[in-house]
Image (cartoon, helix red, strand yellow):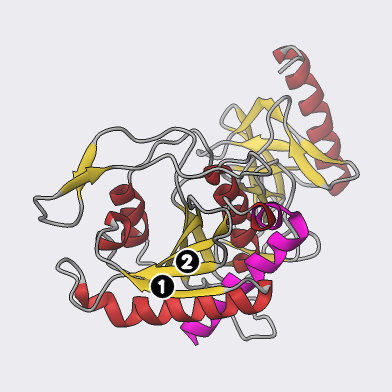
Amino acid sequence: MKKSRWLSILVAIVIIISALGSNKINANAASEGWVNSGGGWWYRFSDGSYAKSEYIDGYWLNSAGWYEAQWTGGWKKNATGWWFESGSWYPESSWLKVNKKWYHFDGRGYMDENKWVDGYYVGSDGAWIPDYKGDSGSSSSGGKVIVIDPGHSGSIASGTEPIGPGSSEYKAKDAGGTKGVSTGIPEYQLTMTIANKLKTELESRGYTVKLTRYDNSTAISCKERAEVANNANAAAYIRLHADGATSSSARGASTICITSGNPYISSMYSQSKSLSQTVLSEYTAATGLNSRGVSERDDLSGNNWSKVPTTLIEMGFMTNSTEDALLNDSSFQNKMVTGIANGIDKFLK
C-alpha cells in the first residue's frame, strides 16, 4: 500500500468512531456494528456472529475477525464494468465477500452479473442470490459439471505416457497441433478462445464449468487432462480441437469417441457415442459446416483415460482457408459455442 501504516490506522479509527457515534453503537450493545475490544476492531452481526475474511465498509477483516489497517478497498467503475480494488490488488477469477454479500470477478477483474458462476447465480447488482431458480428451474445450489479441454498448448508436455490404463503401449503426452493457413493462428490459441466462450455460455445455462488449462503456457498431458474430468465427476467431457490435412480442400466438422470394444473403458461407449452424435448434430446445425460424422477410435489416450462421457470435436479445418477464417471470426465463434452448448443440453436431458 502507498499510504503509511500510521496514517491508515488514524484515518480508519476516525471513520469507525464517527460511524459508531452516528449509529449509537457500543461494545455492549446487541445491535450490529463495529466493536473495539481486545486491543483491536472487529465487526459484530445482529445474530452475534462476526465478520471474517471479508470487507466491511471498505475495511478488511482477517480470518480471525480482526480489522487489518493495511488493507482498505472500495468499488471502482469504468466503461467496461465494476471491480473492487484494494491498493494495487484486485480479485481475478475468484469470489470476494463485501458488506455481507458474495461477488464473483472474471479473469480481468470485472464483477460478473446476471449469470451463473460455479453453479451459483449472481444478479444485476453482481451479488450472489441464494436458492435462485431461473426459468428452467435450475437452482443456484449447483449445476452439473462440464469439463472443457482446450486442445494442445503453447507449451507442450514432454515425454510419453500409456495410451490407456494398464497399457504397455506408450505415446507422446501431447502434440503441437495445426495452424491456420490464412490467419496464422495456432490451434491451441483457437481452442483456448472457444473454451472460454463456451465456459461463459454454459455457465449462463446453469452448469458448473472447469477447464483443463486456463492459459497457453501450461504443459499438460492427455492423461492429466482426462483426470481433471474424472476428478470432477463431469457429466460431460468436451475436448476441443481443429483439423488439419495435406489437402486444402478438406473441410467440415467431426467428433471422435471410443469403440464398443475399447480395452480400457468400454462401459462408457454408449454415453460417449450419444454425446458425440448430439454435439456434432447441433454444432453443424448452428454453424452450417459440413458434417463428417462420428469416428470411433481407441488410439486417443485422452479418451481412453476418461471415466466420464467424452467426445473430441474437430471444429473444422484450419488448413482450409475458408474454414480457418470462419473458425477465427468472433461472430462465427458465437455460433460454434451455441451449437456445442445445445448438444450438451440435448445429451443431458
Labelled disc at residue 37? none
Specify the segment rendered in magenta.
Answer: 324-349
Residue marked by disc 2: 146
- Kindly state the secondary structure of the residue where label 2 is placed: strand
As for residue 345 lying within the magenta part, the answer is yes
Q: Name which residue lies at 78% across and 15% down.
A: 7
Main secondary structure found in the magenta portion: helix
Which quadrant would residue 194 be assigned to in this image? Answer: bottom right
* Mark 1 Cα shell of 10 Å, populated few (<14), some (14-19), many (≥20): some
Q: Is residue 249 visible?
A: yes
Q: Amino acid at mark 1?
A: Ala
The N terminus lies in which quarter of the figure? top right
Q: Is residue 199 left or right of residue 24?
A: left
Query: x%, y% of residue 261?
Result: 18, 76
Question: Which amino acid, mark 2?
Answer: Ile
Callout 1 secondary element: loop
Q: Which residue is mark 1?
A: 235
Do tag 2 and tag 1 residues touch (Cβ < 8 Å)?
yes
Residue 192 is situated, as x and y percent measured from the top left of the image, at: 57, 48
Is 267 or 171 nearer to us in this picture? 171
Q: Position of residue 317 (x, y in %)?
A: 56, 57
Q: Residue at x 31, y 83 (%)?
A: 270
The residue nearer to you, when weighing 177 against 61, is 177
